[in-house]
Image: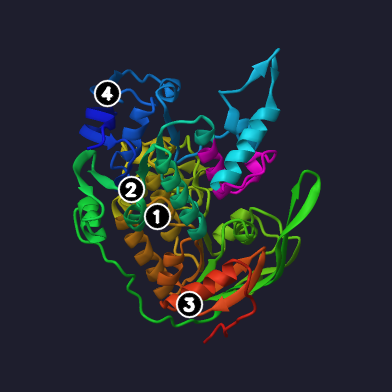
Amino acid sequence: MPQNVIEMRQIVKKFPGLIANDHIDFHVRKGEIHALLGENGAGKSTLMSVLFGLYTPEEGEIIINGQKAQIKGPRDANRLGIGMVHQHFKLVHNFTVLQNIILGVEDVKGGLLQMDAARAKVMALSQRYGLKVDPDALIEDISVGQQQRVEILKMLYRENDILIFDEPTAVLTPQEIEELMQIMRGLIAEGKSIVFITHKLKEIKAVADRCTVLRRGKCVGTVDVKTTSIEEMSEMMVGRKVAAQVEKAPANPGEAVLEVENLCVDLLREGHSKRVVNDVSLKVRRGEIVCVAGVDGNGQSELVQALTGLLPAASGRISLLGQDLTHASIRHRNTHGISHVPEDRHRHGLVLDYRLDDNLVLQRYFEPDFQSGGFIRQDAVLEYAEELIERFDIRSSNGPASIARSMSGGNQQKAIVARELDRASDLLIAMQPTRGLDVGAIEYIHKQLVRARDNGEAVLLVSFELDEVLALADRILVVYEGEIVGELLPDSSEEFRTEIGLYMAGSKRGKEVAADE
């Protein structure tokens, strides 16, 4: 039997009002991909943060390659050969890609940074592992998916032997996920060991050797992936059976709620204007879910930001129930019928240093229900927050008083989804609403999206998860290089998957169906 490269014994990590890790044992063998599975807030990221030195446990010990280790910070972890790709990226937004990758391990001679050798090494790694990046691009100017690649390259650059991937596929496209699976297999072939934190059971089945399941801070057990079904692992994770399919009746579309005509969006980068959304026209009707499918970086983010007011339109028209909103403010759009679940929960979804209850009323605090005479009614805010926390199962250490930054990524996402779905708007625009959520939470969010549709809302869903698109869509719009290249009716056949893949890759275009078919 291969030796253990990691042994975490009886690890206890506590936060105020919460035991995040409750006497957990976790062992990883040399040369294996070991999946760490659990619901949002189960303690997975906390356990790996203990291993990486970001947290100090109250009890327990860590053995690395047979030697007891004192890991007081990430530098200690790196010296022991441990690297980590974080769920919430640890990047400096106004630094370049190259500067972020070498940060902390710079080569300096005569007081000057030696960037040429670093650039050559980064580009070699990028090519070797299929992680295409622009080394001179600023982090703040690249997509979430590209930022993920930078995080992986940071770890590879440091030549770590024990690699922790914390939700690495949460922001990747199906093609990028398959590429990452190949990268992980290649790393194992080179003698490295991987801890793979994910909610996606299919990915565990595809790539992992063993899987340890956590639930509410405790270890439920470790299983052999090949001999354990997805259903069994899912039940271990949430403690109950989870529906495999989304149940929804056929759509009954009504009037057009959102109408977009010849929309163009330009971005200014390095003094040059680049068209990222080109002549897009679409309609979304009451009682239907229209899904925008495509590979990340093809204008989906900019399209959604233009619809919600985060980016200006260069030309074209956006109207909601016949009212022109092309140049309307974000507040006006929020108060006149648009709800928005943004792609980047930290940048556009939450005020991270606000309490959870304040975040849940960000778009409503000025309404009569929540203020009187210009003063916020904290009792009403607290009561409303407690209701949403209960309904959407938002878990945190201190309930409504929890600071958003301290919450797990999945529970931050639940908070945003709860706030936006509860507003019962005419149009719900949701971009990656289930990103980083466990199967139980995904099941719940999918039901809420279908319920919104059945209650007469128009739903525009942007997702990079093809399974999610096929499960929820009444119509599919495929985007490639900022243009809609196909409009399709969903089909569960493998032939349709192949066809939509061709559209997403840009090798096929032009098929349309009537919006009211």
Tell me which label, 4 or 3, sits earlier in the chain. 4
Q: CA distance from mark 2 to mark 1?
A: 9 Å
Q: Are marks 2 and 1 in contact (CB under 8 Å)?
A: yes
CA neighbours of label 1 inside 10 A, class few (<14), some (14 to 19), many (20+): many
Residue segment shown in magenta: 130-153
| Residue 287 visible in the current orientation | no
User: Circle 4 sits on which residue?
Assistant: 66
Please state, as top left, top right, bottom left or bottom right, where the N terminus lies in the image: top left
Separation (CA) of disc 4 from disc 3: 51 Å
Q: Which residue is mark 3?
A: 496
Q: Nearer the viewer, mark 3 or mark 1?
A: 3
Callout 4 secondary element: loop
Query: Residue 133 in magenta?
Result: yes
- 193 or 100: nearer the eye? 193
Q: Which of the two labelled residues, at mark 4 and mark 2, occupies the earlier sequence position? A: 4
Image mark for residue 171: none
Label 4 vs label 1: CA separation? 46 Å
Secondary structure of the residue carrying tag 3 is helix
Which residue is found at the position 45% from the left and 45% from the top? 186
* Residue 57 in picture, x, y percent from top left: 29, 24
Pick the residue in front: 457 or 511: 511
Amino acid type for the residue under numbered disc 2 = Ile
Provide the residue designation for mark 1: 418
